[in-house]
Image (spheres, rainbow, N blue to C red):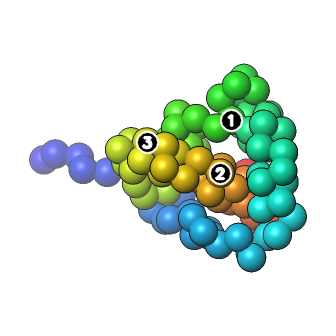
Amino acid sequence: MAVTTQPGRYQPSDFQTGLCDFCDDCGTCCFGMFCFPCMGCSIASDMDECCLCGHSMAIRSVYRTRYNIEGSLLKDYMVTLCCTICATCQLKRDIDRRKDQGIF
């Protein structure tokens, strides 16, 4: 019998906000638009990673894996390539929501 899913702490889910849900948190959106490098460092700090990793596909993939968020490496690559600011803001919104929920 083949194992198709790994046992984990979290049920499969999606990001808590959409890629372009700017109005869900205007502060995060403004932070991403006007101080994009700082947001990347903030995300990397939240994830205990190097400040240079905050905008990368890798940090998004690590986060997705950690919280069992559905997606793929290809999707992470395409989203961060085509919509870098949107992807970074979405990740920051999700981190902040999980902190508020006590599951980060």
Question: Along the polypeptide, which appears first: circle 3 or circle 2?
Answer: 3
The kind of secondary structure element at disc 2 is helix
First-in-chain label (1 vs 2): 1
Q: Mark 1–mark 2 contact, CB under 8 Å?
A: no
Where residue 102 sits, quadrant-wise, is bottom right
Residue reaching furthest left? 1
Q: Position of residue 35 (x, y in %)?
A: 84, 45
Residue 40 in sight here: yes
Q: Position of residue 101 (x, y in %)?
A: 77, 65
Q: Is residue 64 visible?
A: no
The residue at which mark 1 appears reads as 54
> The residue tagged with tag 1: helix, strand or loop?
loop
Q: How much space separates mark 3 and mark 2, taking CA atoms? A: 13 Å
Label drawn at residue 83 = none
Q: Earlier in the sequence, mark 1 or mark 3?
A: 1
Residue 29 drawn above or below residue 25: above
Residue with the mark numbered 3: 77
Pick whichever, 36 or 11, lies toward us.
36
Looking at the picture, which amino acid does disc 2 mark?
A: Ile
Residue 43's spot in the image, x, y percent? 74, 41
The residue nearer to you, when weighing 16 against 23, is 23
Q: Where is mark 2, residue-wise? A: 85
Q: In screen coordinates, is 89 left or right of 100?
A: left
Residue depicted at 39% across the width and 42% down the height: 73
Query: Distance from label 1 to label 2 (Cα)?
Result: 11 Å
Kind of residue at badge 1: Gly
Circle 3/circle 2 CB separation < 8 Å: no
State which mark lies toward you, 3 or 2: 2
Q: Amino acid at mark 3?
A: Tyr
Residue found 69% across the figure and 56% down from its top: 89
Residue at image position (68%, 35%) is 54
Residue at left offset 53%, top offset 33%? 58
